[in-house]
Image (cartoon, rainbow, N blue to C red):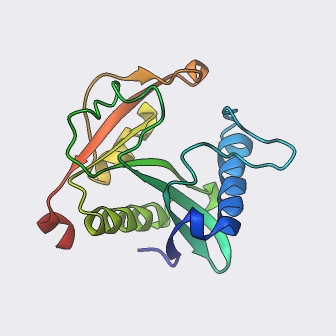
Amino acid sequence: MSNARIETFEIKRCAKVLEEIRKLRYQVYFKELQIDLPGVDHQRETLPDSLDVPAIHIAARIDSDLVGAVRLNLNTVPKGLESTLRTAGLPRPFVYCSRLYVLEEFRGKGIMQDLAAACFQQFYERGAAVAICHCYPHLSKLYQRMGFRSYGSPFVVPKLEHLGAQTPFRCLFSKRQIAA
């Protein structure tokens, strides 16, 4: 456990926080990791995308500063990844986890685990039996520690070929596992 305050909200009710999240995402993905993703707004220094608004967002704050976040979408994955992530046969509701990040200076302090615990609480509250995500191979051990297991073959995200292959992950669970 970290000393971060964890907040869960839906963007349609908290538009101001969406801008904060998009600025933090820009800072982590573009400035820190030097990953130039589609949709980046260099003028406003934000990184929006189409899955933000229908999502549930979980944010970590130290004092009043946003230091990490994760996004959860119910029964929705990015267009073009449905077959790659094999969503057709998944029980409903399923949760798609994406945009999980923590500022570099706060990594290794338990914030990622706090965000993961909040995710699992959301899975439970929404009655989901499975969560799916994908990550770069160097992050696989982190996702395994959070309970995810790889499935399928690594794949390249359309229009992001320059970033290399990603590994698909699933986390299957029962309500008993989450409540424990």
Q: Is residue 31 above or below residue 151?
A: below
Q: Which residue appears at 51% of the width and 74% of the height?
A: 7
Q: Which residue appears at 51% of the width and 79% of the height?
A: 3
Drawn side of residue 147 relative to residue 84, left or right: left
Q: Position of residue 158 (x, y in %)?
A: 53, 21
Q: Is residue 11 above or below residue 165?
A: below
Q: Which residue appears at 53% of the width and 75% of the height?
A: 4
Q: Position of residue 116 (x, y in %)?
A: 38, 61
Drawn side of residue 111 relative to residue 20, left or right: left
Q: Position of residue 89 (x, y in %)?
A: 20, 34
Q: Nearer the viewer, residue 112 or 179?
A: 179
Q: Nearer the viewer, residue 29 or 98?
A: 98
Q: Which residue appears at 48% of the width and 31% of the height?
A: 79
Q: Position of residue 160 (x, y in %)?
A: 58, 24
When asked about the image quadrant of residue 15, the answer is bottom right
Is residue 107 visible in the rendered structure shown here? no
Is residue 24 visible in the rendered structure shown here? yes
Q: Nearer the viewer, residue 36 or 43?
A: 43
When asked about the image quadrant of residue 80, the answer is top left
Q: Is residue 36 above or below residue 102?
A: above
Give the number of callouts.
0
Q: Is residue 89 above or below residue 93?
A: above
**Where the N terminus falls, by quadrant?**
bottom left
Drawn side of residue 1 relative to residue 94, left or right: right
Q: Nearer the viewer, residue 137 or 160?
A: 160
**Where the C terminus falls, by quadrant?**
bottom left
